Amino acid sequence: MALALPRFRRPHFAITATLIAAGLVLYLQHRAISALESQTGVILRQLSEQTANDIAAEVRRTIDGPIFDTLTAVNHPELRAGRLDLVAKQYAEGLRAYPHVDRFLAWNAQTEREAPGEVLFYGRNGSFSRDPALGRAIAALARQHAPAQHIYIAAEGIGPEKRHQVFVRLFWTDARRVDYFAALGFVVDPLLVRRGLFDALYETKLRALLQERGGDVPLQLQVLDEHGTRVHGPPEAQPLAAQITLPMLFYPAEDIGTRLAAGVPARPWSIRVSAARPGGGIAGVSQTYWPTVLSVLLMLVAVGYTVQANRRAADLARMQADFISHVSHQLKTPLSLLSAATETLAMERVRSPEKLSQYLGTIRGEVTRLSALVQRILEFSRLQQARSYEFEVLDLGPLVRETVDAFASSLSRQGFTFRVDEEGVPPHVRADSAAIEQALANLLDNAVKYSGDARLVTVRVRASGNDAVIEVTDNGVGISDLDKPRIFEKFYRGESASLQRQGFGLGLPIVQELITAHRGRVEVESHVGQGSTFRIVLPAQGPLQDATSNPAALATRQEAIR
Ligand code: ADP
């Protein structure tokens, strides 16, 4: 017992150790990845926050641009000299650089002559033109706020549609700020800002910024207005990494606050930056789980196979032990009968010739049984070594008939009927005749052994497609579904074997070995209580006609051997 215990425990120990190792590897990997994930999360948040701030700054720069660049580019003396041509040049550049500007505007003595009481507009058509209603509204706005004596005026809801936002810069004649000689400015259409500002900026600057900042982890931008409605960016929201508020206003309120005659409230838009992929960088990190999970799975599969192999080896060892005790038992019976018979004969106790021939019959019978036993054991040990085959092209019909004849005559007294059916043109095969005879004899032997009371065995030979087929059918005890997958294993004996002490569980493995060496296969169909059909399928030689497709060949030859 003390010796047996470790032997039984070893596989369990190995499995437990493997499972613990696999669990440990997974746990450590999980911890490492969790740490990496949280670090990645922190980095992603910082990165996104910085990117959001940069985007806000870029938007601010764009919004401030027309005020700090375009409207200040032409100096007072030139403006005073009426150089609207210089102004137009700046306006053209401004329209290219600042997508939120709908139109620039200008007023001076010259425009007043052309369009009294209005400002003129410079749009993307590249020239000054009139828009009387809006022009008058803006001129009135300038006049209205001039008494405040500031430089800038910002207002919204201007014009007939009450839609436009307007920014105006007044150019005063002198430091007393009583008269202004020019007004420059621009009009913003909030609808166009919503629709186009971020898309245009994204194409020119923001895309590159997001890519550069994100590096391996692509970042994405979403812009929401003050009501939370999406203005820019993909509709699907990813887990948020950073969000900042952008006070959306068409002029830099903080920078020019003290010089502004009128202003408008800013609207809090949101700039949201997140990883573009679901899970972002974290998903990338999580992918590193897979190699570990895969190797653990492979490890488990390997353990499974080892356990199965162990079990098979134990099965085989048990079956071999059974085999040896069974062989010894089967050898002992004929040997004791032989020794008893020869002893009786030696003592000259047998007087009558009938008795003598009865004893001799017993001796012959037992010798035959012994040599059959020895023959089977030899066959098996021959199979264990590599057997050499002598292949030749054979006509299967005569070969099968002769084998069945020889087998039937050895059983002449047991009342079995063997029928050989040859269907169609007899198939030819390239085979070792001794091997095929042996395989067929083993199947016939089983058909007889497991026949029960039904004493008819049918052997069919036919061609089927490119195959030659030999079928051995009995009407005997049949094979259970549990046994079917295992009957070709060495030493395996099925339920039906309990009816039959003779046999070692080697007949079918030998058949399979022989037929496989011929590049063929062995199939079985069987139902308990109804009988079994074993089918040897060999590759046929040369063009064969399938019996079913050739009516002339359907004439079936039948032969009954008793
Ligand atoms: P055995 O020496 O036991 O006959 P085999 O390898 O020839 O060994 O067959 C393996 C098992 O298959 C048998 O023990 C038996 O259970 C089953 N078997 C084989 N042939 C038949 C048959 N014709 N009818 C029923 N059972 C069969």
Image (cartoon, helix red, strand yellow):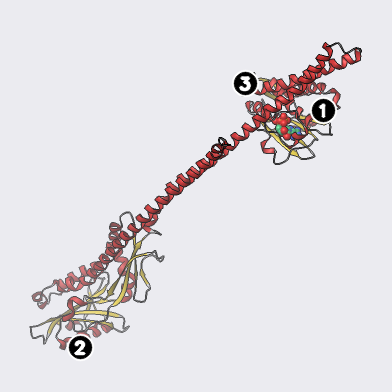
Give the residue at mark 1.
Answer: 418
- For residue 449, say whether it is visible: yes
Indicate the secondary structure of the residue bearing disc 2.
helix
Residue at the front extreme? 2
Q: Quadrant of residue 455?
A: top right
Q: Position of residue 175 (x, y in %)?
A: 7, 83
How far apart are the alpha carbons under marks 1 and 2?
Answer: 125 Å
**Apparent side of residue 190 relative to residue 406 in the rendered image (left or right):** left
- Could you say which disc has been placed on residue 144 in the image? 2
**Residue at (19, 74) in percent of width and height:** 67
Give the residue at mark 3.
Answer: 387
Judged from the image, the quadrant occupied by ligand 1 is top right
Q: Quadrant of residue 333?
A: top right
The answer to whether mark 2 is within 8 Å of ligand 1 is no
Q: Position of residue 267 (x, y in %)?
A: 30, 77
Q: Residues within 10 Å of mark 1 (few under 14, many from 20)?
A: many
How far apart are the alpha carbons under marks 1 and 3?
Answer: 30 Å
Q: Position of residue 510 (x, y in %)?
A: 67, 27
Q: Earlier in the sequence, mark 1 or mark 2?
A: 2
**Residue at (40, 65) in percent of width and height:** 237
In this rendered view, identify the residue nearer to me: 186 or 7: 7
The answer to whether mark 3 is within 8 Å of ligand 1 is no
- Asked whether disc 1 touches disc 2, contact meaning CB atoms under 8 Å apart, the reply is no
**Residue at (67, 29) in percent of width and height:** 509
Q: Earlier in the sequence, mark 1 or mark 3?
A: 3
Q: Amino acid at mark 3?
A: Arg
| Mark nearer the viewer, 1 or 2 | 1
